[in-house]
Image (spheres, helix red, strand yellow):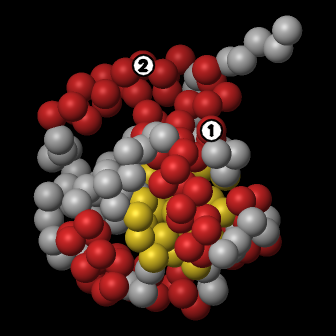
Amino acid sequence: MEVIHIKKFLMPDLVRKSVFEIDLEELRRQGIRGLILDLDNTVIHWNRDVLESKMYDWFYLVHVHQFEICFLSNNFSTRVSRIAKEVNAYYVARAWKPFGKGFKSCIKKMNLPSNSVAVIGDQLFTDILGGNCAGLFTILVNPLSKDEFVTTKIMRIFEKKILQKYK
């Protein structure tokens, strides 16, 4: 009988302070062609509607490196779709992360094999857990802001303990 270690599902493949520290050329060399991106506190501050100008610059670089992009968010579709349109990305809203349906929908929209897709997000229990369960390459970034949904703040306590334990 195989023992399943929780570490396997909660630990990201890569950790960076922000999306700006992700080496896009290295991802391409590893065969990554699509990026599933969390929205809130990964690329935009929680509860805000406008991306910072430096984030638009980053999305320009993502397109220069010829990545497909799909936002995967538990947020409402009107906000997610507007931001996705601004940066020429696909999106799946109300995704119920970490459950797999949203991840599969993003992969299908990008028309890529799962082994060429990476997930970038700021939360272990949604982005990283879901991405790992889907067999995707996962990248954890620090949240852009301490402002966030109350349940997310509670989950951050557990995330911190887990990350400290496995460092």
Amino acid at the residue labelled 2: Lys
Q: Residue 113 location, x and y as percent? A: 75, 66
Q: Identify the mark at residue 93; answer none if there is no mark.
A: none
Farthest residue to the top: give it: 1
| Disc 1 versus disc 2: nearer the observer | 1
Q: How far apart are marks 1 and 2 (CA)?
A: 21 Å
Determine the secondary structure under disc 1: helix
Kindly tell me whether residue 17 is visible in this rendering: no
Q: Residue at horizontal 31%, vertical 23%?
A: 157
Q: Is residue 1 above or below residue 77?
A: above
Can residue 76 be seen here? yes
Which residue appears at 70% of the width and 71% of the height? 112
- Foreground residue among 125 and 92: 92
Q: Judge left or right: residue 111 versus residue 121.
A: right
Q: In this view, does 66 lie to the left or right of 156?
A: right
x and y, in percent, of residue 164 in the image: 49, 22
Residue 42 in the image, given as x and y percentages of width and height = 36, 58
Which quadrant: the C terminus? top right
In-front residue for pair 16/36: 36
- Asked if residue 66 is positioned above or below residue 28 in the image, the reply reads below
**Mark 1, residues whose alpha carbon is within 10 Å: few (<14), some, or many (≥20)?**
some
Residue topped by disc 1: 133
On screen, residue 42 above or below 123: below
Drawn side of residue 73 relative to residue 141, left or right: left
In primary-sequence order, the first of circles 1 and 2 is: 1
Disc 2 crowd rating (10 Å Cα; few below 14, some 14-19, many 20+) is few
Q: Amino acid type of disc 1?
A: Cys
Q: Which residue lies furthest to the right in this view?
A: 1
Helix, strand or loop at mark 2: helix
Query: Which residue in the protein does label 2 denote?
Result: 161
Residue drawn at (37%, 21%), measured in percent from left and top? 158
Where is residue 101? Give x, y as percent. 52, 50
